[in-house]
Amino acid sequence: MPIFGRETQVVDCRHGMGQCRGGGLAQEGTLSEAARPDVIAVAMGPGRRHITKPVCELTYGMRQAGIQVSVLVLSGGTGQPESGLISGSFGIEPEETDQIARHKLAVIHVGNVAQHIIKKIRKILENVEIPAIVVSQALVDFEDLAEAGIKTRYVKPKDEDILTKGTVMEIVTGVTRGEACSRDKLNELVKDVKNTLKSIE
């Protein structure tokens, strides 16, 4: 039971044993569930190109700010999305969709290839009606997402082009995979999370 400042947070450390590389907090196909379903941080499965280190730091930063955060590491999130494929590519299981949907807000950490980021965000939000904050290394913007049929807070695709139930509320870029996350980026994320939670409540 970790204590952050004066607030104690109860975290159910793992839904199941991880099968892949990454260590304790960052194993493939696992869920660490907070006591209150406010925010869920969604990470790609770890591998050579997807290093989940920033997710642990982002989660710790949010918890220090008093935000209740669950962590889901996807079981099929290590490659470029391709329809109908899970192993060796990107996919999201129905159980994982349900786990995300139980929360008020999703913080989705993706990588450094803009085209892959957009496809993964769209795939995750296709079946989950939830507000989301995207955290990436690559520079992507609301226009990029809307052009791909993703609903966003600031730019809306044409009605006939909308492909997602969920909506991207904010984007935090410049969070490098495998490296320490700067205090500025942690502060930016915490501010966006708090403002978004306030707006949806």
Image (spheres, grey):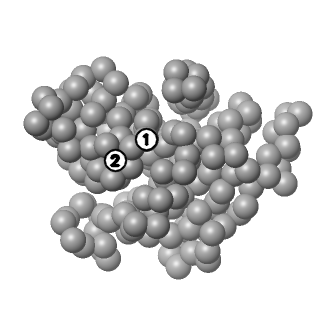
- Residue 183 shown left or right of residue 81 in the figure: right
Residue 163 relative to residue 198: left or right: left
Snapshot quadrant of residue 134: top left
Dot 2 crowding, Cα within 10 Å, few <14, some 14–19, many 20+ = many
**What is the C-alpha distance between the residues marked 1 and 2?**
7 Å
Location of residue 150 with respect to 54 vertically, above or below: above
**How many numbered tags mark residues here?**
2
Question: Tag 1: Cα neighbours inside 10 Å, few (<14), some, or many (≥20)?
Answer: some
Q: State whether residue 172 is above or below residue 155.
A: below
Disc marking residue 125: 2
Q: In the rendered structure, are the residues bearing label 1 and label 2 in contact, judged by CB atoms less than 8 Å apart?
A: yes
Position of residue 188 in the picture relative to residue 9 (left or right): left
Q: Quadrant of the N terminus?
A: bottom right
- Which of the numbered marks, if any, corresponds to residue 5? none
Front-lying residue, 174 or 36: 36
Which residue sits at x=34%, y=47%? 125
Residue 139: image x %, image y %? 30, 33
Which amino acid lies under the numbered mark 1 shown in the image of this protein? Ile
Q: Amino acid at mark 2?
A: Leu
Tell me where residue 118 appears, x and y as whole percent: 25, 44
Q: For the residue labelled by badge 2, is the local secondary structure a helix, a strand or a loop?
A: helix
Residue 49: image quadrant is bottom left
Q: Of label 1 and label 2, which has the lower sequence position?
A: 2
The residue drawn where x is 12% and y is 38% is 161
Residue tagged 1: 130
Q: Residue 76 sits in which quadrant?
A: bottom left
Q: Residue at x 61, y 74 (%)?
A: 16
Image coordinates of residue 67 in percent, x first then y, are 68, 36
> Which residue occupies 21% across, 71% down?
84
**Residue 36 seen from this side:** yes
